[in-house]
């Protein structure tokens, strides 16, 4: 029998299976994203009660199967991990749902995900403690994109690497290049740039590296800047995120 493994994990999604089982997708710190079956999860008070719901932050114990993609989840414990309690506010639920769904969409099963786990855990803890905000959403998006290899550029021109001077008040953002461009490159670019004001560019530059615990009520990029990030993210996903429309209504 394979040895039991253990790792901190965040529950990304679940679905019921048969009469008493549950299939759970987890983002673990040590083993990447895993899909597992928890036998008797809907009935067992001792091993699983309320520990395998979306947003749960647990120490998960599991065994790999010799064949098949699903691992066997043997138990889940809260341990000393911080809990993510979002039930007191619709905006928290909306943003939390988006955070886990975007993480799920950008991570691969059993791939290296320690960085994604750290970004998601920090964002969920900040959401629990300080509430939902556009700044937290944008900081999370930028930092998760960086983990996934898609760092957006807000410091210098993506095409010629020139750093704009303080006199520049409007920037062009090219979705196809993932960053701002100077005026000269903007004229030569084949695709249309999205105009962003200097305050939004400065805010996004800071949010991309600011610790998520410190985001709080930090300045955030304008709705146009948010739309630009969304347009960059959309082609990276295989489907439209179901949580997005709800998030737009509550945040």
Image (spheres, helix red, strand yellow):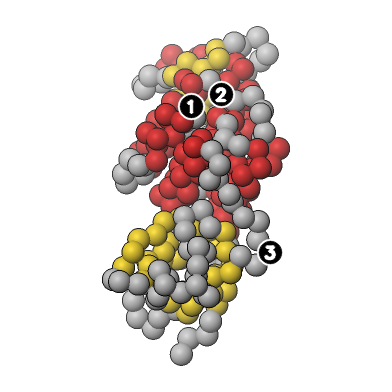
Residue 23 appears at what percent x and percent y? 37, 66
- Residue nearer the viewer, 116 or 61: 61
- x, y (%) of residue 227? 44, 26
Task: Please indicate, yes or no, whether residue 175 appears anywhere in the rendered image.
Answer: no
Q: How far is the residue under mark 2 from the one under mark 3?
A: 35 Å
Q: Earlier in the sequence, mark 2 or mark 3?
A: 3
Q: Earlier in the sequence, mark 1 or mark 3?
A: 3
Q: Is residue 148 above or below residue 173?
A: below
Q: Secondary structure at mark 2?
A: loop
Total tally of numbered discs in the picture: 3
* Extreme residue toward the left, this view: 18
* Residue beneath the point at 60% across and 41% down: 127
In which image quadrant can residue 228 be found? top left
Residue at left offset 30%, top offset 71% = 19
Mark-to-mark CA distance, 2 and 1: 6 Å
Q: Secondary structure at mark 3?
A: loop
Give how far across and how far down residue 214 sits, in percent: 71, 37
Find numbered disc 1 in the image and state the secondary structure of the residue it sits on: helix
The answer to whether mark 2 and mark 1 are in CB contact below 8 A is yes
Task: Find disc 1 in the rendering and name its residue.
Answer: 226
Alpha-carbon span between mark 1 and mark 3: 35 Å
Provide the residue designation for mark 2: 221
Please tell me whether mark 1 or mark 3 is closer to you in this view. 3
Q: Viewer-nearest of labels 2 and 3?
A: 3
Is 113 drawn above or below residue 207 in the view shown?
A: below
* Badge number at residue 80: 3
Examine the rendered structure and indicate whether residue 196 appears above or below residue 149: above
The outermost residue toward the right is 214
Residue 212 lies, in percent from the top left, at 65, 41
Q: Image point 58% across, 20% down: which residue?
A: 200
Q: Residue at x 42, y 61 (%)?
A: 25
């Amino acid at each position: 029998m394979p040895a039991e493994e253990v790792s901190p994990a965040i529950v990304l999604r679940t679905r019921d299976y048969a009469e008493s089982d549950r299939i759970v997708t987890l983002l673990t710190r040590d083993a990447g994203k895993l899909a597992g079956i928890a036998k008797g999860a809907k009935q067992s008070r001792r091993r699983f009660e309320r520990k395998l719901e979306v947003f749960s932050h647990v120490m998960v114990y599991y065994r790999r199967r010799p064949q098949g993609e699903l691992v066997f989840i043997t138990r889940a414990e809260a341990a000393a991990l911080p809990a993510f309690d979002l039930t007191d506010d619709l905006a928290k639920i909306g943003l939390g749902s988006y955070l886990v769904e975007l993480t799920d969409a950008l991570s691969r099963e059993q791939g290296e995900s320690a960085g994604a786990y750290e970004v998601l855990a920090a964002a969920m803890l900040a959401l629990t403690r300080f509430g939902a905000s556009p700044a937290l959403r944008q900081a999370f998006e930028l930092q998760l994109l960086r983990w996934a290899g898609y760092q957006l550029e807000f410091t210098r021109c993506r095409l010629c690497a020139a750093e704009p001077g303080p006199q520049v008040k409007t920037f062009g953002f090219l979705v196809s290049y993932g960053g701002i461009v100077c005026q000269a490159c903007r004229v030569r670019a084949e695709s249309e740039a999205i105009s962003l004001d200097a305050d939004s560019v400065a805010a996004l530059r800071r949010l991309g590296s600011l610790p998520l615990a410190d985001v709080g009520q930090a300045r955030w990029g304008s709705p146009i800047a948010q739309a630009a990030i969304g347009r960059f993210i959309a082609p990276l996903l295989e489907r439209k995120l179901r949580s997005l429309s709800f998030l737009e209504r509550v945040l």
